[in-house]
Image: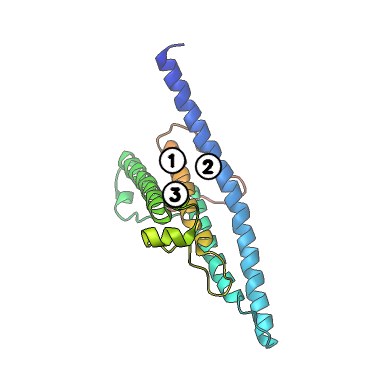
Protein backbone atom coordinates (compact mmCIF):
# COMPACT_ATOMS: atom_id res chain seq x y z
CA UNK A 1 0.00 0.00 0.00
CA UNK A 2 1.41 3.39 -1.00
CA UNK A 3 1.91 6.29 1.39
CA UNK A 4 -0.73 8.30 -0.46
CA UNK A 5 -3.29 5.53 -0.08
CA UNK A 6 -2.50 5.15 3.62
CA UNK A 7 -2.81 8.92 4.09
CA UNK A 8 -6.18 8.94 2.33
CA UNK A 9 -7.37 6.05 4.48
CA UNK A 10 -6.34 7.89 7.64
CA UNK A 11 -8.17 11.03 6.49
CA UNK A 12 -11.33 9.08 5.78
CA UNK A 13 -11.00 7.34 9.14
CA UNK A 14 -10.59 10.68 10.92
CA UNK A 15 -13.65 12.14 9.21
CA UNK A 16 -15.71 9.05 10.07
CA UNK A 17 -14.54 9.20 13.69
CA UNK A 18 -15.40 12.90 14.05
CA UNK A 19 -18.84 12.53 12.49
CA UNK A 20 -19.61 9.45 14.61
CA UNK A 21 -18.48 11.27 17.77
CA UNK A 22 -20.60 14.29 16.87
CA UNK A 23 -23.68 12.12 16.24
CA UNK A 24 -23.19 10.30 19.54
CA UNK A 25 -22.72 13.56 21.43
CA UNK A 26 -25.78 15.11 19.85
CA UNK A 27 -27.92 12.09 20.74
CA UNK A 28 -26.69 12.24 24.35
CA UNK A 29 -27.20 16.01 24.50
CA UNK A 30 -30.78 15.59 23.30
CA UNK A 31 -31.50 13.21 26.18
CA UNK A 32 -29.67 15.45 28.65
CA UNK A 33 -31.64 18.52 27.52
CA UNK A 34 -34.93 16.66 27.95
CA UNK A 35 -33.83 15.39 31.36
CA UNK A 36 -32.75 18.80 32.64
CA UNK A 37 -35.95 20.42 31.36
CA UNK A 38 -38.03 17.87 33.27
CA UNK A 39 -35.82 18.31 36.33
CA UNK A 40 -36.05 22.11 36.19
CA UNK A 41 -39.84 21.99 35.81
CA UNK A 42 -40.14 19.61 38.76
CA UNK A 43 -37.86 21.76 40.95
CA UNK A 44 -39.87 24.90 40.20
CA UNK A 45 -43.21 23.17 40.86
CA UNK A 46 -41.95 21.71 44.15
CA UNK A 47 -40.59 25.11 45.13
CA UNK A 48 -43.95 26.80 44.46
CA UNK A 49 -45.93 24.14 46.34
CA UNK A 50 -43.64 24.09 49.37
CA UNK A 51 -43.55 27.89 49.62
CA UNK A 52 -47.35 28.12 49.53
CA UNK A 53 -47.45 25.38 52.14
CA UNK A 54 -45.06 27.40 54.32
CA UNK A 55 -42.57 24.52 54.20
CA UNK A 56 -39.94 25.79 51.74
CA UNK A 57 -37.00 23.56 50.87
CA UNK A 58 -33.95 25.76 51.18
CA UNK A 59 -31.77 23.99 48.57
CA UNK A 60 -34.35 24.05 45.75
CA UNK A 61 -33.37 27.51 44.45
CA UNK A 62 -29.71 26.62 44.13
CA UNK A 63 -30.57 23.32 42.45
CA UNK A 64 -32.70 25.17 39.88
CA UNK A 65 -29.91 27.66 39.18
CA UNK A 66 -27.33 24.97 38.50
CA UNK A 67 -29.83 23.02 36.41
CA UNK A 68 -30.29 26.09 34.21
CA UNK A 69 -26.50 26.47 33.93
CA UNK A 70 -26.00 22.89 32.77
CA UNK A 71 -29.04 23.08 30.49
CA UNK A 72 -27.68 26.27 28.91
CA UNK A 73 -24.23 24.87 28.12
CA UNK A 74 -25.54 21.53 26.87
CA UNK A 75 -28.12 23.33 24.74
CA UNK A 76 -25.48 25.70 23.36
CA UNK A 77 -23.34 22.74 22.30
CA UNK A 78 -26.29 21.07 20.56
CA UNK A 79 -27.22 24.34 18.86
CA UNK A 80 -23.69 24.55 17.46
CA UNK A 81 -24.12 21.22 15.66
CA UNK A 82 -27.67 22.09 14.57
CA UNK A 83 -26.35 25.41 13.23
CA UNK A 84 -28.83 27.33 15.34
CA UNK A 85 -26.18 29.63 16.78
CA UNK A 86 -26.71 33.29 16.02
CA UNK A 87 -25.07 34.93 13.03
CA UNK A 88 -25.11 38.47 11.69
CA UNK A 89 -25.74 38.21 7.95
CA UNK A 90 -26.25 41.85 7.00
CA UNK A 91 -22.98 41.84 5.07
CA UNK A 92 -22.58 38.22 3.94
CA UNK A 93 -26.04 37.95 2.42
CA UNK A 94 -25.03 40.60 -0.10
CA UNK A 95 -21.98 38.64 -1.25
CA UNK A 96 -21.74 36.00 -3.93
CA UNK A 97 -22.41 32.35 -3.13
CA UNK A 98 -18.71 31.46 -3.18
CA UNK A 99 -17.82 34.30 -0.80
CA UNK A 100 -20.71 33.41 1.49
CA UNK A 101 -19.32 29.86 1.65
CA UNK A 102 -15.86 31.24 2.47
CA UNK A 103 -17.18 33.39 5.33
CA UNK A 104 -19.17 30.42 6.62
CA UNK A 105 -16.02 28.32 6.72
CA UNK A 106 -14.17 31.11 8.54
CA UNK A 107 -16.99 31.44 11.09
CA UNK A 108 -17.00 27.69 11.71
CA UNK A 109 -13.23 27.77 12.10
CA UNK A 110 -13.56 30.50 14.72
CA UNK A 111 -15.97 28.29 16.67
CA UNK A 112 -13.31 25.56 16.72
CA UNK A 113 -10.63 28.04 17.80
CA UNK A 114 -12.88 29.26 20.63
CA UNK A 115 -13.57 25.69 21.76
CA UNK A 116 -9.87 24.78 21.82
CA UNK A 117 -9.05 28.03 23.65
CA UNK A 118 -11.72 27.26 26.24
CA UNK A 119 -10.30 23.75 26.71
CA UNK A 120 -6.83 25.18 27.32
CA UNK A 121 -8.25 27.71 29.78
CA UNK A 122 -10.11 24.97 31.67
CA UNK A 123 -6.95 22.85 31.92
CA UNK A 124 -4.98 25.81 33.27
CA UNK A 125 -7.77 26.68 35.70
CA UNK A 126 -8.59 23.19 36.97
CA UNK A 127 -4.94 22.10 36.81
CA UNK A 128 -5.49 18.31 36.86
CA UNK A 129 -1.72 17.70 36.95
CA UNK A 130 -1.33 20.00 39.95
CA UNK A 131 -4.13 18.44 41.98
CA UNK A 132 -2.76 14.98 41.16
CA UNK A 133 0.74 16.06 42.26
CA UNK A 134 -0.76 17.20 45.56
CA UNK A 135 -2.17 13.72 46.11
CA UNK A 136 -5.69 15.02 45.42
CA UNK A 137 -5.44 16.93 48.71
CA UNK A 138 -7.53 20.05 48.02
CA UNK A 139 -6.14 22.04 50.96
CA UNK A 140 -2.53 21.23 50.08
CA UNK A 141 -3.19 22.15 46.45
CA UNK A 142 -4.81 25.45 47.47
CA UNK A 143 -1.87 26.28 49.73
CA UNK A 144 0.64 25.63 46.95
CA UNK A 145 -1.17 27.35 44.09
CA UNK A 146 -3.70 29.71 45.74
CA UNK A 147 -6.29 28.01 43.55
CA UNK A 148 -9.25 27.35 45.84
CA UNK A 149 -11.42 25.62 43.25
CA UNK A 150 -11.27 22.24 44.97
CA UNK A 151 -11.92 23.56 48.47
CA UNK A 152 -15.06 25.56 47.66
CA UNK A 153 -18.52 24.12 48.19
CA UNK A 154 -21.97 25.36 47.20
CA UNK A 155 -23.95 27.33 49.75
CA UNK A 156 -27.00 25.14 50.33
CA UNK A 157 -26.36 21.86 48.54
CA UNK A 158 -22.85 21.68 50.03
CA UNK A 159 -21.56 20.05 46.85
CA UNK A 160 -17.98 20.55 45.60
CA UNK A 161 -18.13 23.43 43.16
CA UNK A 162 -15.61 21.82 40.79
CA UNK A 163 -18.13 19.08 40.03
CA UNK A 164 -20.65 21.68 38.86
CA UNK A 165 -17.98 23.59 36.94
CA UNK A 166 -17.23 20.47 34.88
CA UNK A 167 -19.87 21.74 32.49
CA UNK A 168 -17.25 24.16 31.08
CA UNK A 169 -14.64 21.62 29.87
CA UNK A 170 -17.41 19.28 28.73
CA UNK A 171 -18.94 22.12 26.72
CA UNK A 172 -15.54 23.05 25.28
CA UNK A 173 -14.86 19.49 24.07
CA UNK A 174 -18.34 18.90 22.67
CA UNK A 175 -18.49 22.26 20.91
CA UNK A 176 -15.09 21.65 19.35
CA UNK A 177 -16.16 18.23 18.04
CA UNK A 178 -19.39 19.68 16.66
CA UNK A 179 -17.45 22.55 15.12
CA UNK A 180 -15.06 20.18 13.35
CA UNK A 181 -18.04 18.15 12.08
CA UNK A 182 -19.64 21.33 10.73
CA UNK A 183 -16.36 22.35 9.10
CA UNK A 184 -16.05 18.98 7.35
CA UNK A 185 -19.54 19.51 5.95
CA UNK A 186 -18.79 23.10 4.92
CA UNK A 187 -15.70 21.92 3.05
CA UNK A 188 -17.78 19.21 1.33
CA UNK A 189 -15.49 16.54 2.76
CA UNK A 190 -18.47 14.61 4.14
CA UNK A 191 -22.13 14.62 3.07
CA UNK A 192 -24.43 16.81 5.11
CA UNK A 193 -26.95 14.67 6.97
CA UNK A 194 -30.03 15.91 8.83
CA UNK A 195 -29.66 15.27 12.60
CA UNK A 196 -31.87 12.57 14.05
CA UNK A 197 -34.31 13.40 16.84
CA UNK A 198 -34.62 17.10 15.97
CA UNK A 199 -37.48 18.40 13.87
CA UNK A 200 -35.97 21.39 12.08
CA UNK A 201 -37.24 23.32 9.12
CA UNK A 202 -35.04 25.17 6.68
CA UNK A 203 -35.99 28.42 8.42
CA UNK A 204 -34.79 27.26 11.84
CA UNK A 205 -31.09 27.60 11.09
CA UNK A 206 -29.54 31.07 11.08
CA UNK A 207 -25.93 30.03 10.46
Q: Position of residue 179 (x, y in %)?
A: 43, 44
Find disc 1 in the rendering and name its residue: 180
Tell me which label, 2 or 1, sits earlier in the chain.
2
Front: mark 1 or 3? 3
Q: Residue at x 55, y 51 (%)?
A: 200
**Do tag 2 and tag 1 residues touch (Cβ < 8 Å)?**
yes
Regarding residue 65, the answer to whether it shows in the image is yes
For label 2, the crowd category at 10 Å Cα-Cα, with few meaning under 14, some 14 to 19 and many 20 or more, is many
Regarding residue 199, the answer to whether it shows in the image is no
Disc number at residue 22? 2
Depth order, front residue of 22/139? 139
Find disc 3 in the rendering and name its residue: 133
Determine the secondary structure under disc 2.
helix
Image quadrant where residue 148 sits? bottom left
Compute the Cα span from label 3 to label 2.
Answer: 33 Å
Tell me which label, 1 or 3, sits earlier in the chain.
3
Q: Residue at x 43, y 58 (%)?
A: 141
Determine the secondary structure under disc 3.
helix
Amino acid sequence: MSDQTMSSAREVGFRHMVMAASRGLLAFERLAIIGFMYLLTALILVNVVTRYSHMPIYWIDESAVYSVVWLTFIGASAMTRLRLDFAVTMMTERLSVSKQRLFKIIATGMVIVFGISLMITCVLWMDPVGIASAGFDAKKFAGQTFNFLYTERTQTLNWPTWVLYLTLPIFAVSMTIHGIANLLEDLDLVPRVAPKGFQLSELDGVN
